[in-house]
Structure formats: structure tokens, C-alpha cells
Amino acid sequence: MNPYVGIELDGGQMYLMADTPDGFLEHSVSIDRECTLLKLQQEVESFIAHLPYKPSGIGMGMPGLVVGSDKVELSHVLPALNGVSADQFSTTASIPVAFINDVKAATMAEAAHYGNNETIAVVMLDAFIAAGIVANGQLLLGSKGWSGELGYMLIGMNGEPVLLDLIASGYAISKKADKDNAAIRALLEAGHEETIEIVRQAGTYLGYALVNLIHLYNPSVMVIGGSTSTYRGYMEAAKAALDAHALPELLKCCTITTPKTPQRLIAFGAREWIRKQTKSQS
């Protein structure tokens, strides 16, 4: 039995999960931008109180800039987390807590399916774009823990620099099409040429960014997930750009695949993160 708790936070929900001798225990609660730190703390306390054992640690995956594993520098999605430290969630049972950025948590979840000798790149494509890298079993963090802001990669358009987020993300597609997710998917299925072209262009720009990732990190596996990646024609365009522009030798040794943990990636990854943190300290 895994004795660690995994928690996933986003703009709409807090999800908590843990193993127990009687099976898997999970709990979800709706939250929003106005959610308070006290509410989040109370939800953690309540979940821990329902477990039949004292967990070895709590991993929390969240949106924003996480410094190391113990402080949130900035979270536009959940302002209540700004400046918060991990020990503020340690609960009355004094359980170790580790923070991790949500995309890095997803990276940890996926890397757990591969050997430590692999280099794993994980790209998540939802409203915006981010990436994580694990090499030789170690998560690449950067000097402050802020590596992986792939959506801030600059792409040249008409001689001007443009953020990848603004031309290749789910947000970019929705804004250009002036439609929501459901409407875009319906138009794609109906063969609407303008929408198909918008998605194709976005996928192509994403492909250029993936070329850069492959050239920079030479991954053996690239995992691509998130809702935007499931738009019809999006990944086909991205892969066409890869085939056209990536060095063949690097592309050949990189397996491009989808997540092996298709749901609750962040919670599972946060649990793996705290497990590694506590193991390294013992």
C-alpha cells in the first residue's frame, strides 16, 4: 500500500486521493479564485482525519510558480496560494508536505512508468501549454523550480515575437475561432474548413515547439496530453511539423505517445513527488 497522499488543485476543483487497506479513497470539492487558504487547509485536515493511518507525506500539485518544493511564489489561478509555504498544510499530525507545479506533477506521474535511464519529456496542452523533463530519474527544476514554461516560448510571426500560448494553445484556438470547446469540436466533426485550418495552424506551431524540445533534450519518450491535443487534426499537424523540421536521428530515437495515467495525473504525480522527497531525506 502506498502510504502517501496526493492532492490536485486547479481553478475549479480540489481533489484528494490515498490508498487504504480497504481500497482507494478519494474526495473532490469545488473551489474557485475566491477560495481561501483556510478552506484549503480544512479540506486537507478533514481528508487526513478520515484515513485509518498517519500518511508518510502529502504531495500537492498546483498551478503557479512553485519555489523548490515548499513555497508558492505566484498563482494567478488560486491567489490564496500566493506566498504560502508547505508547512502551512502540514496538519495537526505534523505530516511532511511537498508542493509541486501541476505540469511537473504530471511529468512525475508519467516518468514513474519508465526506467530511470530514460529521458522523459511531458507536454500538457490545455488552455495553455507547459512541459516537464525527467532525466535519469531526476525532475529538471531550474534554479528556482520554474523550468518548463513552454507556452512562453517565442515564435516569430511577420517579423515579430509571439508567445506560443497565443498561437498554439486551446485558448488561442478558442479565441481565433470565437467559439467554445464544444462548438469547436462540433465544427471539426462537421468538416468546417475555417475551423479545421485554425486547428491545423495551431498544431503546426506546437510542432515547431516540439522540434525545439527534441533538439534541446534528446528525449527517449515524449508524452503529449491535455484536452487541446485531442482536437481533430491538431496532433497530425504537429507531427507533420516534427517530420519536416526535426533532425531525423533525434526524432527516430524519441517515442511520441499519450499519457499512461490518463486521469488525475497531477494528484498521482504529486504523490510520487513527496515519496521521492521523503526517501531522499531518510
Image: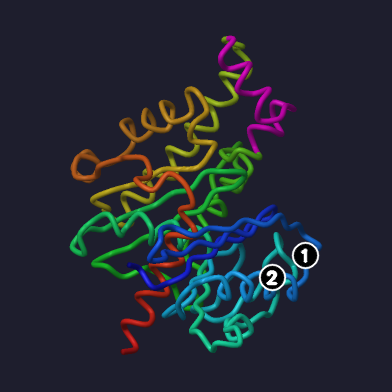
- Above or below, 123 against 138 in this view is above
- Decide whether residue 24 is among the magenta residues: no
Magenta region, residue range: 172-190
Q: What element carries label 1?
A: loop
Work out how far the residue at label 2 is from the one at label 1, CA to CA, in angstroms. 8 Å
Q: Are marks 2 and 1 in contact (CB under 8 Å)?
A: yes
> In the image shown, does 252 or 191 lie closer to the viewer?
191
The image quarter containing residue 20 is bottom left
Instruction: State the residue lying farthest toward the right.
Output: 34
Q: In this view, does 162 lie to the left or right of 179?
A: left
What percent of the width, then of the height, locates residue 206?
A: 48, 39
Pointer 1 residue: 35
**In the image, what residue occupies the spot 62% across and 83% down?**
85
Q: Earlier in the sequence, mark 2 or mark 1?
A: 1
Q: What residue type is labelled 1?
A: Cys
**Magenta span: chief secondary structure:** helix
Q: Is mark 2 on a helix, strand or loop?
A: helix
Mark drawn on residue 101: none
Looking at the rendered image, the quarter that the C terminus falls into is bottom left
Looking at the picture, the colour scheme in use is rainbow
What percent of the width, then of the height, locates residue 252?
A: 20, 40
Q: Is residue 199 left or right of residue 262?
A: right
- Above or below, 277 against 121 in this view is below
Mark 1 Cα-neighbour bin, 10 Å: few <14, some 14–19, many ≥20: some
**In the image, what residue occupies the spot 60% across and 83% down?**
91
Pointer 2 residue: 40
**In the image, what residue occupies the spot 33% across and 63% down?**
134
What percent of the width, then of the height, locates residue 53?
A: 45, 77
- Above or below, 239 against 150 in this view is above
